[in-house]
Amino acid sequence: MDKRIVASLDITDRRVLLDLASRLSDEIFAIKINWPTILTCGVDIIRELSDFGNVICDLKIADIPNTNRMIMEIIRERNPFAVIAHAFPGLDSIQALLDASEGVKVIGVVSMSNEGAERYLNPLHLKILNDLKNTSAYGIIAPGNDYRILQEIAKKRGNLKIFSPGIGAQGGSPSLAIMNGADYIIIGRNIYNAQNPEAYVRSVNQQIEK
């Protein structure tokens, strides 16, 4: 079975986080962590979690090239699988991350799953996508709760892998997101707030298989 779930574990208790990561590791493609986890547990939590599989650092990096380079140099020493970055600051900023990556994959944000993204980011999603296709980026973020945008992006993504948030708590369906073009689905609250996270993840995997 291909693993298609990225578990977004926005947990700030190190013990709880590591325990859950260990329990889910056989059922998921990757663990994604965001700023709340890194700010409370420290940057070395990335290395600790990498013992259980791929770690995606969802930093939404969005700065000038030199700052982007410095961030990547710090993060890459902790053995992450990938880093998520915004592409809107420009291709020079994305390229700085790629140049400093030393094998860490870069996933660029094309469109987001929150309602407010419709005002500024989402109207530019195809322009951002076309720019990222001209780089060596590994993947893109596209919403798993807006199937129209997801389909449109999927048709034009080239070789870029699609990671789709917005599943569960934001209304997206795991199976519909996959059917509409997502390679991987990002699920957070529905996993770590579940009474039995392992059983929930297994049930999603079964949905995807069907």
Image (cartoon, grey):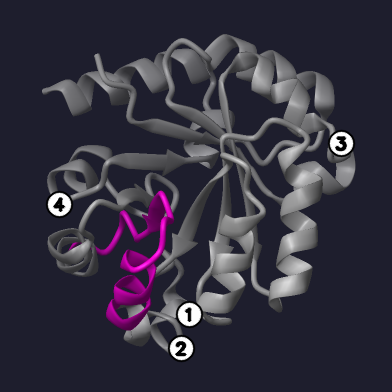
Amino acid on which the number 4 mark rests in the picture: Asn
Amino acid on which the number 2 mark rests in the picture: Tyr
* Residue ID for mark 3: 41
Magenta run includes residue 139? yes
Which x, y percent locates residue 107?
Answer: 48, 54
At 84% from the left and 32% from the top, the residue drawn is 44
Foreground residue, 66 or 47? 66
Q: Please indicate, yes or no, whether residue 20 appears anywhere in the rendered image.
A: no
Kindly report the distance in space between the C-alpha atoms of the residues bearing marks 3 and 1.
29 Å
Q: How crowded is mark 3: few (under 14 residues within 10 Å), some or many (20 or more)?
A: some
Q: Are marks 2 and 1 in contact (CB under 8 Å)?
A: yes
Instruction: Residue 180: give its label.
Output: 4
The residues colored magenta run: 126-147
In terms of secondary structure, where does tag 1 sit?
Answer: helix
For the N terminus, the image quarter is top left
* Residue ID for mark 1: 116
- Of mark 3 and mark 1, the one earlier in the sequence is 3
